[in-house]
Image (spheres, rainbow, N blue to C red):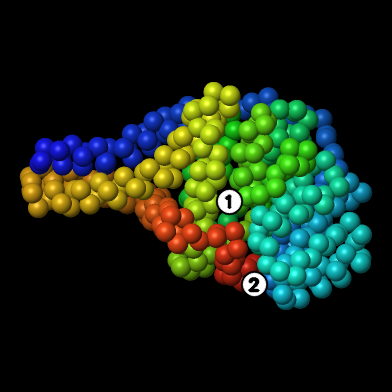
Amino acid sequence: MLGVLHVLTLLLLGIPIFIFGMYGIVILYFGRQGKKEYDEESEEFVPQVSIVVPTHNEEVIISKKIDNMLHLDYPKDKLEIIFVDDSNDSTPNIIKKYSKKFPYIRLISFRERMGYSPSMIAGCKAAKYEVIVFAEAGSFMDAQAIRNLVRHFKNPKIGMVTGRSIILNADEEIGGAETSYREIADFLRMAESQMDSTFRIKGEATAVRKELIRDLETCIATFDNTAALFIRQKGYKVIYDPQVIFYEYAPKTHTDWAKQKTIRAANWIKMLLRFRNMFFNRRYGRFGCITLPMEFSMLVIVPITLVMGSISLIILTFLDVSFSLTIWGALGSVILVSLLFKRKMTVTFFEFEYALLKALYQIIFTRTEHDKIDKITSTRTRAIEQYP
């Protein structure tokens, strides 16, 4: 019995090391390769673009968001901005004032709370143009963001392009931690794009071919990430371009940051479960055979095995002190070195693992509907106070 517990403890604690180690090697290999053909500079490509922005009670920030989009460097005769609103405050009235002055601004209003994904589906169906750009009320696009997004669609293999977030309060504790997390995530997205397609989409600045999501009717997770897998399922690539830049603020409090990470994690897990038929399917290339199984492993298997391994090690501590102390010593040394040299990254890792466990609990036991969870208010507050 004791021997079985030894093996089980080593196995459970070894699984996360194996998963991160294997995918880490793959990511490092592809992440250091040269840019693919679709990343190269090409002649200007300026298609007609519809920007879709879902809004819910954004009266304090919506004017800044609209002003930001009015200053985008893109021909206004090839642009429409669609707001899909389900607010019960003055947000729609503010949008209407702008739409009277700028005819390419449109408003779709709902009297009931729709949630992010239904709002995005409605906006995309109403879009008139061939390329749709997803945007978000609490973030701000770089002036060149649209041009950098749409240029990739000269390549007929590209179905979706996503961009890079710059945290404006990176000098703060949480902002710095979020920046560290984003740097890792961006390297991961770049490598996945080089390998085939990326799994992680940022709906604050993403572009898609309208024809590819015309038949996307429902989402059990967020619309942007669901659309990415929906498009890859049709044989098109989903890529990340670091030159597509948008700006946002990290939450002000640890409570808000934990809430943000849990929502993010829960939607990723739900999406992976929905598209599990793509796992290990050679039809979807390296994305199906490598990226999706490894992402599922990191988001679901790793946090579960870490908890089970820790419980097993605690039990073993009372049964075989010398063996368990060896493991505790090895784990403690690794964590200590990590905290000394990469403190923010290490703390972020453990906080994200906790968010994954919380997300799994909400999915399995409480059946939480993450699409309608209220936004992180502190991110809006900072933007009102500080964004020009």
- On the question of residue 164 being in view, the answer is no
Q: Residue at x 45, y 40 (%)?
A: 296
Q: Residues within 10 Å of mark 1 (few under 14, many from 20)?
A: many
**Which residue is label 1 attached to?**
221
Residue 246 position within the rendered picture, expressed as x and y whole percent measured from the top left:
66, 52
**Which residue is label 2 attached to?**
385
Q: CA distance from mark 2 to mark 1?
A: 32 Å
**Label 2 secondary element:** helix
Judge from the rendering whether residue 113 lies leftward or rightward of residue 358; answer left or right. right
Q: Residue at x 71, y 69 (%)?
A: 112
Residue 37 position within the rendered picture, expressed as x and y whole percent measured from the top left:
68, 24
In the image, residue 54 above or below residue 193? below
Farthest residue, direction bottom: 89
Foreground: disc 2 or disc 1: 1
Amino acid under disc 2? Glu
Q: Residue at x 27, y 41 (%)?
A: 12
